[in-house]
Image (cartoon, rainbow, N blue to C red):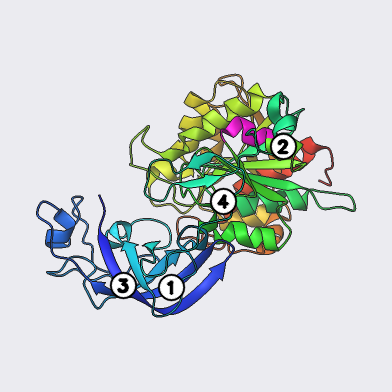
Amino acid sequence: MMIWREGVVRRLGRAWPGAAELEVEVTDGASAAAGDPVAATGVPATGVPATGVPAAGVPVTAGPAGPVPAGTTVRALAYPSLVGEPAPGDRVLLSAAALARGLGTGGYAMVVALPDRLPADPAPGPGHLVKARYTPLQTLVLGADEQESEHHEVLRDADDLAGLPVVVADLHSALPAVVAGVRAAWSGTTAPRVVYVMTDGGALPAWFSRALAGLREAGWLAGSVTVGQAFGGDLEAVSLHSGLLAARLVLAADVVVVAQGPGNLGTGTRWGFSGTVCGDAVNAVVALGGQAVASLRVSGADPRERHLGVSHHSLTAYGRVALAPADVVVPRFDDALAAALPGRLAERIDDQVAGLVAPVGIHRLVEVPTDGLLEALAGSPVALSTMGRGLDADPAAFVAAAVAGVHAARVAGRPVR
């Protein structure tokens, strides 16, 4: 379903590569649509009021004109590569359904078009991959693996990752923590070349991620590859398999991190969550001769039982979807960290992981001590946040991701731990 709004740009906000925040005054609130429970009543079908303050801190008010009435000022996000460069005074068309329902990462209305000032047609160039296919904002990109690409010959018959360590993670928020772990365990005079391969389970534009932009700016990532329907990376690829090969053969990765973009989708059911693709990613890595490193989604602070300790997302993806063995990395909490964690969290994690690893499961148990990792995580150039919780509120979540990075550095052959 779509909730359309029209507005005027009042102020420009933050910008980072590929994205621009705007302050937009809604000028057309639309009438309540018959049969739309949000537009008619301000209450979604789930029974959760559409009023209040979403994660981004922008008030959304329900009323007779719908959940985002005329006169409301909202935060909006534009992708200039798709819609052009917004400026104060521009009229914009917005997609506001997720904002109205308080859903999603960021709490934005999304800019669909600048109808009075359309961007010029791009110069003719190569590329025929269509991503976000058959949606109004489908975009044409040059795939690293397609015939028009300079990398086509390298990738045409490529079939081997040659033991490249690939860390697979459920949540996008694990990315900076994994990279911090890699860097903490890396020796030598040159920094590790870590490449992020972004799948299409969350946000499709890589531009949505401020973390990705910040890690690139800080030199913590050597590049990114967007695969499937995702787009906006340094390289584009048709599939996860070709994206992994591009990370190794084109971007010369020492370590790869595979995770969806921001905006994990879950329904509170056994199988209805976007993280199932972690198991598919393990299968792809092993099929191509890489070393799959399974990063566990862990929490010591999540109020939901199914996500406490090791999330059921990890247990299902690695225990049921993955058909090839991976290294399942478990933190061995140092005394200081263990004292700060909820009681019996370590024992709970051990009990949950037992079903994944030999002799019960197909995976290999790898235990990594956590000494020094809190300091490494605190040095991240981007904010650490998962499900609204930072490093202080849920250290186990980030440490569990960081130890996977430590192990990947060991697999790559340059450990200092």
Residue highlighted by disc 1: 22
Task: Of the two numbered discs 2 and 3 on the same chain, state the one appearing first in sequence.
Answer: 3
Q: Position of residue 157 (x, y in %)?
A: 71, 23
Task: Of the two numbered discs 4 and 2 on the same chain, state the one appearing first in sequence.
Answer: 2
Circle 2: element type? loop
**Three-letter amino acid code at the position of disc 3:** Gly
Task: Of the two numbered discs 1 and 3 on the same chain, state the one appearing first in sequence.
Answer: 3
Residue highlighted by disc 4: 232
Is 15 in front, or is 61?
Answer: 15
Q: Position of residue 295 (x, y in %)?
A: 60, 40
| Cα gap from disc 4 to disc 2, whole angstroms | 17 Å
Q: Is residue 291 above or below residue 174?
A: above
| Cα gap from disc 2 to disc 3, whole angstroms | 43 Å
Is 200 in front, or is 368?
Answer: 200
Is residue 329 a member of the stretch shown in magenta? no
Residue pictured at 51% horizontal, 45% vertical: 140
**Three-letter amino acid code at the position of disc 2:** His
| Cα gap from disc 1 to disc 2, whole angstroms | 37 Å
Visible residue check, residue 90: yes
Q: Position of residue 266 (x, y in %)?
A: 37, 43
Q: Is residue 117 above or below residue 141?
A: below
**Three-letter amino acid code at the position of disc 4:** Gly
Residue 51, quarter of picture: bottom left
Between marks 4 and 2 in the image, the one whose residue lies nearer the viewer: 2
Visible residue check, residue 328: no
| Cα gap from disc 1 to disc 3, whole angstroms | 11 Å
Q: Which range is magenta?
A: 238-245
Circle 3: element type? strand
Residue highlighted by disc 2: 151
Horizontally, residue 344 falls left or right of residue 60, namely right
